[in-house]
Image (spheres, grey):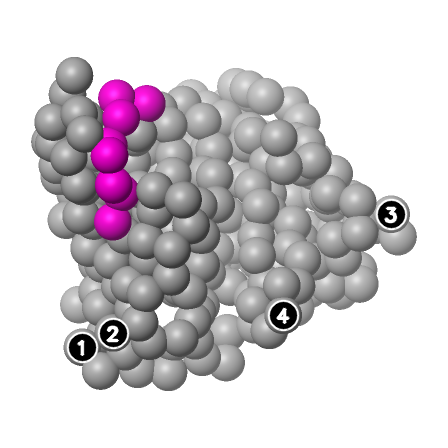
Amino acid sequence: ETGVTQSPTHLIKTRGQQVTLRCSSQSGHNTVSWYQQALGQGPQFIFQYYREEENGRGNFPPRFSGLQFPNYSSELNVNALELDDSALYLCASASASGSVYEQYFGPGTRLTVT
Amino acid sequence: QKEVEQNSGPLSVPEGAIASLNCTYSDRGSQSFFWYRQYSGKSPELIMFIYSNGDKEDGRFTAQLNKASQYVSLLIRDSQPSDSATYLCAVKLDNAGNMLTFGGGTRLMVKP
């Protein structure tokens, strides 16, 4: 168990709808990252939050947005859902181990867009 | 060319053998390298990381890094059927914050 929790576990949405996914970081971790993992592929970085501010973004359109709250929990919002948004969405919180940040993943939210 | 490449497999080894998983990366400024294990339907689990050239051992796992060849590998000694999973190589690129770039993963099958 990493101490990172995500909700919901599974979600089915219709194309064009909006969705909000939630993540609670491990205690003491002030950095949270979101990744999208399509079936059969490695995770792809969406963005990262540090102290409630976006601190890095991957190659995802603006309809992917996020928030981080003072208690370091986080949300991922996706607007205007497309079929290709169907994937496992992973939240990772990070702690520093010397000069290296170890990222620990939550169980993920499986999103299906129909 | 993908930034992080792995052979998708499956790599099949008999129980008790050494499994060798390989990963190459394209950015010479890459700083740290991570190996994750992912069971089917589950999220990735961090096995270990390495950032200096050479070997790093943790139990049955050894990570090897060769920055000159832009190559990182994971050796699993005394492979067990419970090691059967997809192994993901991840690289922290230079000037990329804490963003990890993942390879597509190698599926390992350990046969009893």
Residue B66's tag is 2
Q: Nearer the viewer, residue A48 or B92?
A: B92
- For numbered disc 1, what is the local secondary structure? loop
Give neighbour class at mark 3: few <14, some 14-19, many 20+ (Cα, 10 Å): some
Give neighbour class at mark 2: few <14, some 14-19, many 20+ (Cα, 10 Å): some
Disc 4: host chain: A
Pointer 4 residue: A98
Q: Which residue is located at x 67 percent, y 57 percent? A: A95
Q: Are marks 3 and 4 on the same chain?
A: yes
**A75 to A114, vertically: above or below:** below
Disc 1: host chain: B
> Disc 1, disc 3: CB below 8 Å?
no
Pointer 1 residue: B69
- For numbered disc 3, what is the local secondary structure? loop
- For numbered disc 2, what is the local secondary structure? strand
Q: Are marks 2 and 4 on the same chain?
A: no
Sequence order check, earlier mark of 3 and 4: 3
Alpha-carbon span between mark 3 and mark 2: 40 Å
Pointer 3 residue: A71
